[in-house]
Image: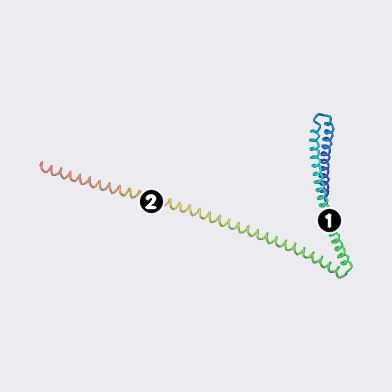
C-alpha cells in the first residue's frame, strides 16, 4: 500500500469521525433543549417533537455508523489486498534475486561456464563491432548516393539550362527571320505599288499622247482646209 493511499484512508477516517462527532453534538444539544422545555407550557408536545427528532438523529447516527463500519471494512479489505500483492511481488523479487545469485555462483564455480561466458562476451563485442561497421558502411553508401544524386541533379540542371538557352536563341532567330521576311514582304509590296504606279503613269502618258496626236491631227486638217 502506497503512502498516498494511507494518507487518503486516514483523511477519510478523520472526515467520518468529524461527521459522527457533529451528529453526537447535535443530538446532545437537542436533548438539552428537551430538558429545558420541560418547564415550559406545551412541554408534552415539545417533548414528543424532540423525542421524534432525537429518534431521527439516532437513526441517522446509526446509519452513519453502519456506513463508517462498511467503509472501514472495505478499506481494510483493500489494504489487505494491497499488502498481499506487495508481499507477493517482494517474494517474486527475492526469488528472482536468488535465481540470479545461484546462476552467478554456478557460472563462477564452473570452468566451462566461465569460458562460455567469456566467449559470449567476446561474441557480443564482435557483434557490436560488426553492427557499428555495418552502420558506418551504410552511412557511407548513403552519403555516396546523396552526392551522386546531387551530381545528377546538377548535370540535369546544366543540360536544362543549355536547352533553355538554345530554345531562346532559336526563338530569337525565328523572330529575326520572321522580321526579315516581313521587311522583304513590305519591300515587295512597295515594289508592286511602284510598278503599278508606273504602269498607270505609262497608261496615262499613252492616253495623253493619243489625245495630243488627235488634237494635232485635227489642227493639221483644219489648217489644210484653210489653205
Tell me the quarter of the picture where residue 216 sits: top left
Tell me the quarter of the picture where residue 101 sits: bottom right
Q: Position of residue 12 (x, y in %)?
A: 81, 45
Residue at point 83%, 69% (across, down): 116
Q: Nearer the viewer, residue 66 or 141?
A: 66
Work out whether mark 2 precedes mark 1 in sequence or the reverse, and give the earlier one.
Answer: 1
Q: Position of residue 48 (x, y in %)?
A: 80, 35
Residue at point 18%, 45% (across, down): 214
User: Which structural element holds mark 2?
Assistant: helix
Residue at point 70%, 62% (across, down): 138
Residue at point 65%, 60% (across, down): 145
**Which is in the foreground here, disc 2 or disc 1?**
1
Q: Position of residue 24 (x, y in %)?
A: 83, 39
Q: Position of residue 144 (x, y in %)?
A: 67, 60
Q: Nearer the viewer, residue 182 or 120?
A: 120
Q: Which residue is mark 1?
A: 84
Q: Give the residue at the far right of this rendering.
A: 109
Q: Which mark is residue 185?
A: 2
Q: Is residue 188 above or below residue 27?
A: below
On screen, residue 171 versus residue 104, left or right, reads left
Q: Quadrant of the C terminus?
A: top left
Q: Is residue 202 above or below residue 25?
A: below
User: Which structural element holds mark 1?
Assistant: helix
Badge 1: few (under 14), some or many (20 or more) residues near its Cα, within 10 Å? Answer: few
Amino acid at each position: 500500500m502506497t503512502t498516498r493511499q494511507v494518507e487518503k484512508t486516514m483523511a477519510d477516517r478523520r472526515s467520518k469521525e468529524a461527521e459522527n462527532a457533529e451528529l453526537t453534538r447535535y443530538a446532545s444539544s437537542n436533548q438539552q433543549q428537551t430538558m429545558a422545555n420541560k418547564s415550559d407550557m406545551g412541554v408534552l408536545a415539545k417533548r414528543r417533537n424532540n423525542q421524534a427528532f432525537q429518534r431521527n438523529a439516532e437513526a441517522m447516527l446509526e446509519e452513519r455508523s453502519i456506513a463508517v463500519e462498511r467503509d472501514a471494512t472495505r478499506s481494510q479489505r483493500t489494504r489487505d489486498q494491497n499488502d498481499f500483492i506487495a508481499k507477493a511481488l517482494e517474494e517474486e523479487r527475492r526469488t528472482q534475486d536468488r535465481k540470479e545469485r545461484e546462476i552467478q555462483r554456478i557460472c563462477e564455480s564452473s570452468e566451462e561456464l566461465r569460458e562460455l561466458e567469456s566467449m559470449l562476451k567476446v561474441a557480443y563485442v564482435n557483434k557490436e563491432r560488426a553492427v557499428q561497421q555495418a552502420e558506418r558502411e551504410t552511412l557511407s553508401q548513403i552519403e555516396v548516393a546523396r552526392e551522386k544524386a546531387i551530381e545528377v541533379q546538377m548535370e540535369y540542371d546544366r543540360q536544362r539550362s543549355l536547352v533553355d538557352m538554345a530554345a531562346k536563341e532559336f526563338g530569337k532567330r525565328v523572330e529575326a527571320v520572321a522580321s526579315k521576311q516581313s521587311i522583304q514582304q513590305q519591300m515587295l509590296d512597295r515594289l508592286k505599288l511602284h510598278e503599278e504606279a508606273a504602269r498607270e503613269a505609262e497608261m496615262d502618258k499613252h492616253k495623253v499622247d493619243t489625245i495630243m496626236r488627235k488634237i494635232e491631227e485635227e489642227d493639221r486638217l483644219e489648217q489644210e482646209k484653210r489653205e
